[in-house]
Image (cartoon, rainbow, N blue to C red):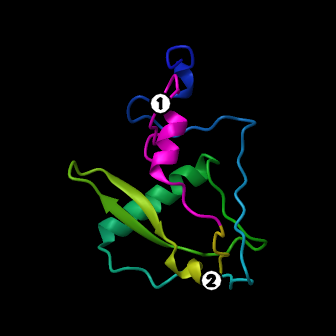
Amino acid sequence: MLRKNRPAFAIREEPLGKIKGHDIELYLDVERPYPPILRRPPYPASLETRKEIEKCINEPLDMDVIRKIGHNKIVEITTPVLITWNDGKSRLCGDFRSLNNYTKADRYPIPRIPHALDKLAKAKYITKMDCMKGFH
C-alpha cells in the first residue's frame, strides 16, 4: 500500500505540501460566541524563539497550506508555543485552553480500550501516522 502511494507520503523532512482538491474545513461547535481575540498574552520568549515562531507560521501561510480565519482576518484564538526537541528541531503548537470555556462538551464517552482492541483484531493493516509533524 505504501509503495503504491509513495508520492502521498513524506519519509523525511521535506518542504510542506498540500493535495489540491482535498481541502478540509474544520468547524468548532461553540455554546456561545467567543470574542475575536481570545488568546492569552504571549509567553516570554527570546528574540530567536519569536523569529522561529514567525517562520513556523509564515511558511505554511505563504504556501497556502493554512489560512487566517474570520471575516476581518484578525481572529486570534491561540497563543503560539514553540516546542524544541532534543535534536534541536522545533514544532509550533497552540495553547487553546482559553477556548475551552466556549466549546460544547462532548456528550459521548471515550471508547473503552478493550472494545477498540476487539475492532482492530481482524485488521489487515494497522498504522500510526503523524503526517510528518502532526500529533496523534
| Residue at the spot of label 2 | 37
Res 48 → quadrant: bottom left
16 vs 8, nearest the viewer: 8
Residue at (44, 37) in percent of width and height: 128
Residue at (49, 84) in percent of width and height: 40
Mark 2 or mark 1, whichever is nearer to me = 1
Q: CA distance from mark 2 to mark 1?
A: 41 Å
Q: Amino acid at mark 1?
A: Ile
Element type at marker 2? loop
- Indicate left or right for 5 with 92 as reference: right
123 vs 129, nearest the viewer: 123
In this rendering, is residue 68 above or below 132? Answer: below
Q: How many marks?
A: 2
The image shows residue 57 at horizontal and vertical percentages of 51, 59
* Residue 130 included in the magenta stretch of the image: yes
Element type at marker 1? loop
In this rendering, is residue 2 above or below 62? Answer: above
The image shows residue 39 at horizontal and vertical percentages of 54, 81
Determine the main secondary structure of the stretch shown in magenta: loop
Residue at (62, 38) in percent of width and height: 18
| Residue at the spot of label 1 | 126
Magenta segment = 108-136
In this rendering, is residue 67 above or below 12? Answer: below
Dot 1, how many residues are within 10 Å of its Cα: few (below 14), some (14-19), or many (20+)? few
Dot 2, how many residues are within 10 Å of its Cα: few (below 14), some (14-19), or many (20+)? few
86 vs 104, nearest the viewer: 104
The image shows residue 11 at horizontal and vertical percentages of 41, 28
Q: Earlier in the sequence, mark 2 or mark 1?
A: 2
Residue at (79, 71) in percent of width and height: 71
Q: Amino acid at mark 2?
A: Ile
